[in-house]
Image: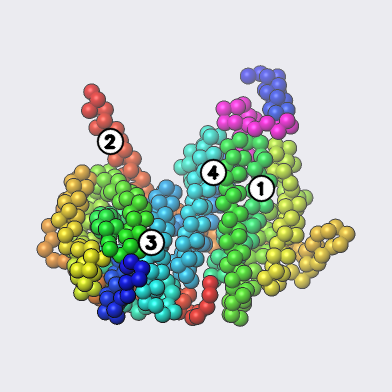
Amino acid sequence: MSEEQIKSLENQFEARIARDEKIEPKDWMPEKYRQTHIRQMSQHAHSEIIGMLPEGNWITRAPSLRRKVALLAKVQDEGGHGLYLYSAAETLGISRDEMFEQLHTGKAKYSSIFNYPALTWADMGAIGWLVDGAAIINQVALCGTSYGPYARAMVRICKEESFHQRQGYEIMLKLSQGTQEQRDMAQDALNRFWWPALMMFGPKDEDSPHTAQSMKWKLKRKTNDDLRQQFIDQTVPQAELIGLTVPDPDLKWNEERQSYDFGEIDWDEFWQVVKGHGPCNKERMAARVNAWEGGAWVRDAAMAYAEKQQERKTKQVS
Amino acid sequence: MKAGIPLNETMKNNLYKYILGIADNSLILGQRMGELCGHGPSLETDIACTNLSLDLFGQVRSYYQYAAKIAGDDRTEDDIAMLRKERDYLNVLLVEQPNRDFAYVIGRQFLFDVYHHLFLMELQKSKDLTLAAIANKSIKEVSYHLRFSTDWVKRLGDGTEESHTRMQEAIDQLWTYTDELFHQTEADKEMVSEGIGVDVTKLKEEYYNKVAEVLAEATLQVPDLKYFQKGGKQGIHTEHLGYLLAELQYMQRAYPNMEW
């Protein structure tokens, strides 16, 4: 293809996005668009899978049968989200095995929030309420993204996530209505998860290298800082409602902006965790790599069995 | 029971124990499957194992809620699930065996599912309408469990040399716990005579036939074993159960008398 032809395709492509048309797998797309989507969608899928670990940890210790069943259902949903997101990413010409490979070698990232430990039962509440809450804000913005398979996966995922968020908040509500020990447990979980949840929206706009291009492709429809503000404005009153204190001494309602002012995020901590040195980065990765390597013989067996079945069928026909 | 029929104390105790004998199997197996979450050999099997665990705990809740009602005091489903002592759990030894590898997970599931399915088919006919209804609802889920574990026994048995060896080893090791499935406690016998319980001794032949059929298709040998383990139904367990209960009961023990 000549440079001129490519330029013309690019122009048509940009025009389609500007008209809010969806881009589908078989449509022509610039290589950078494809790569950016593979990066973001696989990162998103990996986050679902890694996200199963801190919560999966608490399945065996859930305090009641009702909570155990709800937690199992939640973690199962996350596995399901991982499945659709991997499938959606596969439409861009990358296999699930390749994506796993990128995760296991550290080439692909996942949401840093899952590198924080889930230490008490209240963390199941905090994760549902804050982490799923932050995820929904990011994801609602993605339901209108330009890549069709991703946008459709997001619509489905958002419905389930908002259920998870309510479930998490309900855990916190119950704790806040409980004994002093339970209220302390809830406050402690909020203290530990508040700042990492704010970090889920990524670096400040001025430090976010991909924002401009992603906004143009409608892969992002709002900036990191806008989404973070939206999360804070929505979550602070929820904390107040159940008598919990957001651990930010600088948090204050700004009448003029009709929004909360908030304190400075510890960006050193943010980068430390992103670069692989958070409290649980190594454990999370080891758990995934062990599951993958330890399960190789099972996947090989399934493959060998399917091949034998196929051969038997072929023989029967002939 | 049909509404309105008063139960005498002995009958009540027997029915209560009988329900626990059924439900504890699902509780302990559900707990074992729940340990695997996030660590499965593939995303699909991970989701399936979580789903099995979820189904089993759902069944457990129905049984324990009913048992709590029979007991007629202020105990709840969670008290029954989490506040008994080790010797009071009545599950069979098979379901408490640990997740040594995926072949053990599948072997344990399969050897239990074949039994569970036959058992629920009969329990549906119970004169106790609550138990019959729980059986009727559970059997749909358990049919899926049985299909899942049967398919995997075949895949692993007739897959690669390594998977065949591992699957055979798991079946060989777990076989010793199968005979107990068909033992009857005093409560069982009472409930059978009342037309409430299932006579498990009558399921034995069909069980071993079905298992043998699948093992043959999976190119696996039926173990030639003459000695079997028992004790779970009397609350005498393997050493594995204590650790499982420590996790299961942790919150209820560490934070007693609280609502969650």
Instruction: Judge whether residue B201 can be spotted in this image.
Output: yes
Q: Are marks 4 and 2 on the same chain?
A: yes
> Residue B59 has which mark?
3
Q: CA separation, marks 4 and 2?
A: 30 Å
Q: Secondary structure at mark 1?
A: helix
Amino acid type of disc 2?
A: Gln
Number of marks present in the image shown: 4
Q: Secondary structure at mark 4?
A: helix
Amino acid type of disc 1?
A: Val
Chain for disc number 4: A
Marks 4 and 1, the one that precedes in the sequence: 4
Whether tag 3 and tag 4 are in contact, CB under 8 A, the answer is no
Q: Nearer the viewer, mark 3 or mark 4?
A: 3
Q: Which residue is mark 2?
A: A309
Q: Nearer the viewer, mark 4 or mark 1?
A: 1
In percent of the image, x 64 and y 52: which residue is there?
A136
Q: Which residue is mark 1?
A: A140
Q: Nearer the viewer, mark 3 or mark 1?
A: 3
Q: Which residue is mark 4?
A: A85
In percent of the image, x 46 and y 62: which residue is there?
A69
The residue sitting at the right extreme is A256
Question: What span is colored magenta in the figure?
Answer: A17-37
Q: CA separation, marks 3 and 1?
A: 35 Å
Q: Are marks 3 and 2 on the same chain?
A: no
Q: Is residue A212 left or right of residue B238?
A: right
Quarter of the image for the N terminus of chain B: give it: bottom left
Marks 1 and 2, the one that precedes in the sequence: 1
Q: Secondary structure at mark 3?
A: helix
Marks 4 and 2, the one that precedes in the sequence: 4
Residue A25 is covered by the magenta coloring: yes
Q: Are marks 3 and 4 on the same chain?
A: no
Q: Are marks 3 and 1 on the same chain?
A: no
